[in-house]
Image: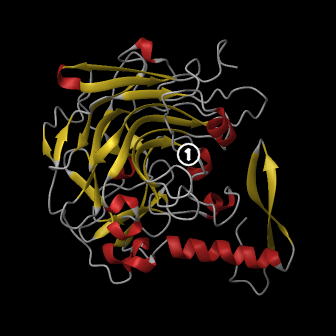
Amino acid sequence: MEANFGCCFFLLVLLVPFTCAGRAVMSTTTGSGDGSIQKLDVQKHLKNLNRPPVKSIKSPDGDIIDCVHVSHQPAFDHPDLKNHKIQMRPNFHPEGNTFGESKVSLNSKPITQLWHKSGRCSEGTIPIRRTKKDDILRASSVQSFGKKKLKSTPQPKPAKPLPDLFTQSGHQHAIAYVDGGNFYGAKATINVWDPKIQQPNEFSLSQIWILAGSFNQDLNSIEAGWQVSPDLYGDNNTRLFTYWTSDAYQATGCYNLLCSGFIQINNDIALGASISPLSNYGSSQYDISLLVWKDPKEGNWWMQFGNDHVLGYWPAPLFSYLTESASMIEWGGEVVNSESDGQHTSTQMGSGHFPDEGFGKASYFKNIQVVDGDNKLRAPKDLGTYTEKENCYNVKTGSAGDWGTYFYYGGPGRNPNCQ
């Protein structure tokens, strides 16, 4: 409901939580007192997120992409970044075998973003997906908008299962991982699909996790990949995303540019924007290449999309443990299982098909690599796998030629063997 402040009167809006289809959201009703304060909180948050643009671009999927001057982005609201000097390029780039990048099978059309069909942002600006009032109203509160729930990172252990950790959080995973060393980045080429989501409060994503610290109160995490999240974006589009936290998803961090933190320098790729084209079962396959690494000189963590797009960086002051190195790298899929009807969700992971189906049918990560202490890309050693319920979602690793170290992952969720 839009409030018209240009009139001589306005309707006071009371924002109260209610539950719909197992999902807590904010509702608008008439009222006074706290309601008007919360309405003003929404308006204030929108004003803070949506910076005055140099120009705006209407994407075919309904998004508005604002081209905002690079120095006016939300990152610089962070107290540790008030006097930060923007680093416009990394000092060092990881060296090593990069294999074949962003190759497609049966089709040579490159991965792009839908808003590019309507225009581009000029040098000196960055594209920011405009946040709408409805986006915030779908969240349980203004404060929780753009944030993951607690215990969102898989914590593999040799002995399984870990029901106390995972069934409480409602998050399920199918991942490959390395731990027990010092890692300075990670890379992967990720197959891109459009998994079906059962409930609006559930999501499905495929990503890289860069982790350090403990999984309880002080976990540092940098994350990047693609996701389908109706709650966050208001649709079922497959979108590029990033995430960060320095306190195990409690108070710090957010998706994309929905809080201060990540500094974007690239004018061509919008975080949170739709990816196109997408893979089709038994037909054309598309993937994106993502690289996250630590600049040995400045200590900032950089992100690259494909071969040519260095998107920006997470400044070192955002973190505690990641100021040194990561202690674990994870690659794979994650879904939310809300069990809204008392059964396991039918939300899909990856392509929605199990790893055994193979290429063109199951989703994959290929050419997965880590950045070592010499700033070189190398294949991960002692790669482990983890999934909570292998009859719902699973993972299968391999190694071969141009694909380097790879794995297939995912599944349909609810099925006769997953209730």
Q: Is residue 251 above or below residue 209?
A: below
Tell me where residue 25 sits by quadrant: bottom right
Q: Position of residue 70 (x, y in %)?
A: 32, 72
Tell me where residue 372 sits by quadrant: top left
Element type where label 1 sits in the image: loop
Q: Position of residue 84 (x, y in %)?
A: 31, 79
At horizontal 39% and vertical 28% (from top left) the residue drawn is 384
Q: Can residue 114 be seen here?
A: yes
Q: Camera-side residue: 101 or 212?
A: 212
List the residue tagged with mark 1. 152
At horizontal 40% and vertical 78% (from top left) the residue drawn is 80
Q: Is residue 27 above or below residue 230?
A: below
In the picture, measured across the screen, residue 177 lies left or right of residue 162, that is left
In the picture, measured across the screen, residue 67 lies left or right of residue 6, that is left
Q: What is the residue that sits farthest to the bottom in this orientation?
A: 8
Q: What is the residue that sits farthest to the right in this orientation?
A: 31
Q: Position of residue 177 (x, y in %)?
A: 38, 34
Q: Position of residue 145 (x, y in %)?
A: 61, 60
At horizontal 33% and vertical 57% (from top left) the residue drawn is 119
At horizontal 50% and vertical 63% (from top left) the residue drawn is 258
- The amino acid marked with disc number 1 is Ser
- The quadrant in which the N terminus is found is bottom right
